[in-house]
Image (spheres, rainbow, N blue to C red):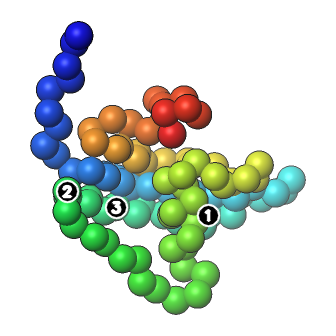
Amino acid sequence: MNKQPEYDGPVLEIEKLSISFFTRLHEIPAVMDFSVSVAPGEAVGLVGESGCGKSTVALGVMRDLGKNGSIVGGSIKFKGRDMADMDDAEL
């Protein structure tokens, strides 16, 4: 059996994440250039005003932005692996 080497970096790395929602006529930016790194054993809370993008960031990480939402920039890595390269079963 091929055993993967132990990963010792951040559990979650979000770099310059930008998310938009699209209408027939417009792109509506919802999150712009959000970055955070979460180390093993660490907890991070998102705090901000209503409508500032906290839930949108969480939904973006889970790839659940509905039919009109899209990640338009940045990257999300889980244990060093780009989540954009993961299929539905892996997510």
Q: Is residue 59 above or below residue 5?
A: below
Q: Position of residue 91 (x, y in %)?
A: 51, 39
Q: What is the distance, in whole Å, between disc 1 and disc 2 at their CAs?
A: 31 Å
Indicate the quadrant where residue 78 lies.
Answer: top left
Q: Nearer the viewer, mark 3 or mark 1?
A: 3
Is label 2 in a helix, a strand or a loop? loop
Q: Residues within 10 Å of mark 2 (few under 14, many from 20)?
A: few
Q: Which mark is residue 29?
A: 1
Q: What is the distance, in whole Å, between disc 3 and disc 2 at their CAs?
A: 17 Å
Q: From this viewpoint, which residue is outermost toward the right?
A: 24
Q: Residues within 10 Å of mark 1 (few under 14, many from 20)?
A: some
Q: Is residue 45 above or below residue 88?
A: below
Where does label 3 land, which residue?
35
Is the N terminus in the top left, top right, bottom left or bottom right quadrant? top left
Q: Is residue 5 above or below residue 10?
A: above
Indicate the quadrant where residue 87 lies.
Answer: top right
